[in-house]
Image: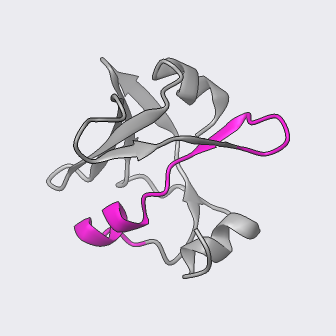
Amino acid sequence: MNTAAYEALGSPKHVALLYDRENELIGMQSVSGSAPHAYVVRGVGNNRATHVVSGKAFLTYYGIPRDVARRWSAEIREDTLIVDLKQPGTEVTGHSSRAHRGGDD
């Protein structure tokens, strides 16, 4: 997630990932590290301006395709960052796309 999304969530160290199957929405909420199903948020890059959550198990559990790396626009609704999977997203290439094809996370 970019800096704006990270800061909109309150610059969390951990998040919970949520899924609404009916509406095909993924949600992300800031939680404590002791919360059930808390995922660690890691800063990446030289300036740590991008933050990632390893959601491979989450995507697999819900059957959300990850064969092609994509970026989506997101919006904040109350305290949740929402991504609408019904939107096409933008395909990305490079290091992160290799991970989505089964490489290292």
- The answer to whether residue 94 is magenta is no
The quadrant in which the C terminus is found is bottom right
| Residue 93 is at least partly visible in this image | no
| Residue 81 is at least partly visible in this image | yes
Q: Nearer the viewer, residue 54 or 20?
A: 54
Q: Which residues are magenta?
A: 44-65
Residue lying at the far bottom in this picture: please name it.
Answer: 102
Drawn side of residue 52 relative to residue 12, left or right? right
What colour scheme has been applied to the protein in the rendered image? one colour
Drawn side of residue 40 relative to residue 21, left or right? right
Drawn side of residue 35 relative to residue 68, left or right? left
- The answer to whether residue 47 is magenta is yes
Q: Residue at x 47, y 44 (%)?
A: 40
Find residue 67 and report its horizontal and vertical position in percent: 50, 78
Q: Height in image: 14 above or below 68?
A: above
**The image quarter in which residue 80 lies:** top left
Find residue 64 and report its horizontal and vertical position in percent: 33, 68
Q: Nearer the viewer, residue 19 or 13?
A: 13
Q: Residue at x 61, y 24 (%)?
A: 4
